[in-house]
Image: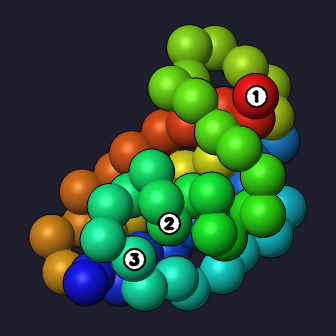
Amino acid sequence: MKTYLVEEMAGDTPVSHHTVVAQTPWEAATIGTRKEVRARTDERLWVRVTEESSRAVYKYAFK
């Protein structure tokens, strides 16, 4: 299990954040937001997930 920082974003501005322990960034996004997510294209409201150990960033949008 890895630790992720899950941030709900409005454009480039974080509006909330959660630290989540999960197996995948996709799972962390779902747990942290309590909503279903999908891959992000260019949505204004989206989710940024950062793996804390490697600092890898993943981007998702709400379904």
Q: Is residue 52 visible?
A: no
In this picture, residue 11 sits left or right of residue 24: right
Crowd tier of the residue under label 2, counting other residues whose Cα lies within 10 Å: few below 14, some 14–19, many 20 or above: many
- Quadrant in which residue 41 is drawn: top right
**SS of the residue under disc 3:** strand
Label 3: few (<14), some (14–19) or many (≥20) C-alpha neighbours in 10 Å: some
**Front residue of this view, candidates 2 and 56:** 2
Q: Which residue is mark 3?
A: 22
Residue at position x 24%, y 57% in the image: 56
| 2 or 1: tag closer to the N-terminus | 2
Q: Earlier in the sequence, mark 2 or mark 3?
A: 3
Distance of label 2 from label 3 (alpha carbons): 5 Å
Query: Which quarter shows the C terminus?
Result: top right
The location of residue 8, given as percent across then percent down, is 74, 56
Q: Identify the image quadrant of residue 60.
A: top right
Q: Residue 63 shows which numbered tag?
A: 1
Q: Amino acid at mark 1?
A: Lys
Task: Residue at 66%, 32% (x, y): give it.
Answer: 61
**61 or 1: nearer the eye?**
1
For the N terminus, which image quadrant?
bottom left
Residue type (three-letter) at the residue carrying disc 3: Ala
- The amino acid marked with disc number 2 is Ala
For the residue labelled by badge 1, is the local secondary structure a helix, a strand or a loop?
Answer: loop
Checking the image for residue 35, the label placed there is: none
Residue bearing mark 2? 28
Give the image location of residue 23, x and y in percent: 30, 71
Label 2 sits on a secondary structure element that is helix
Front residue of 9 and 4: 4
Question: CB of mark 2 within 8 Å of CB of mark 3?
Answer: yes
